[in-house]
Image (tube, helix red, strand yellow):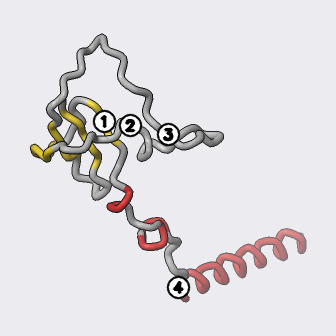
Amino acid sequence: MIYSRWRPEGDGYDYFDVDEVVNINDDLPTPDLREAGRLGVPSIEAGRPIPAGASWVGNGDDAIGLVAPVDSRRLVSRSHIGALEPAPRGGADAIVLVGVLLIAGVVVVAARAR
């Protein structure tokens, strides 16, 4: 049986082979998931754990066989991901904002003077 585990780096799945055969019609054990929140269980926690003794057999772009939860040791804290942090505001943005407010003020004063 092949298990697939997504790689958080975003480059596909790792494949693991286990010396067990699961027939399509057999009921698989229910995965042990933490209590679901209002939106359900996070997708990176869902899946069936890879059994002990599994051997890595390769990787690829798509999941094959049973999908396993992500290895949490490979996840990066959100505070370390620059793309999720707001961009620093520079002085040029403040100058543009002041300019737009000045123009809007002139337009309002001119409209009231008529």
- Quote the CA–CA distance across marks 3 and 1: 14 Å
Where is residue 48, by image quadrant?
top left
Q: Amino acid at mark 3?
A: Leu
Pointers 1 and 2 in contact (C-beta within 8 Å): yes
Task: Please give the residue where the numbered disc 1 appears in the rendered image.
Answer: 67
Query: x and y percent of residue 98 in the render?
Result: 67, 83
Task: Please give the residue where the numbered disc 2 appears in the rendered image.
Answer: 47
Query: x and y percent of residue 96 in the render?
Result: 59, 80
Residue placed furthest toward the right: 113
Where is residue 67, by image quadrant?
top left
Q: Amino acid at mark 4?
A: Gly
Q: Earlier in the sequence, mark 4 or mark 2?
A: 2
Front-most of residues 52 and 78 = 52
Q: Quadrant of the C terminus?
A: bottom right
- Tag in front: 4 or 1: 1
- Binning the other alpha carbons within 10 Å of mark 1 as few (below 14), some (14 to 19) or many (20 upward) gives some
Task: Please give the residue where the numbered disc 3 appears in the rendered image.
Answer: 33
Q: Is residue 6 above or below residue 25?
A: below
> Of helix, strand and loop, which one carries label 1?
strand
- Quote the CA–CA distance across marks 1 and 2: 5 Å
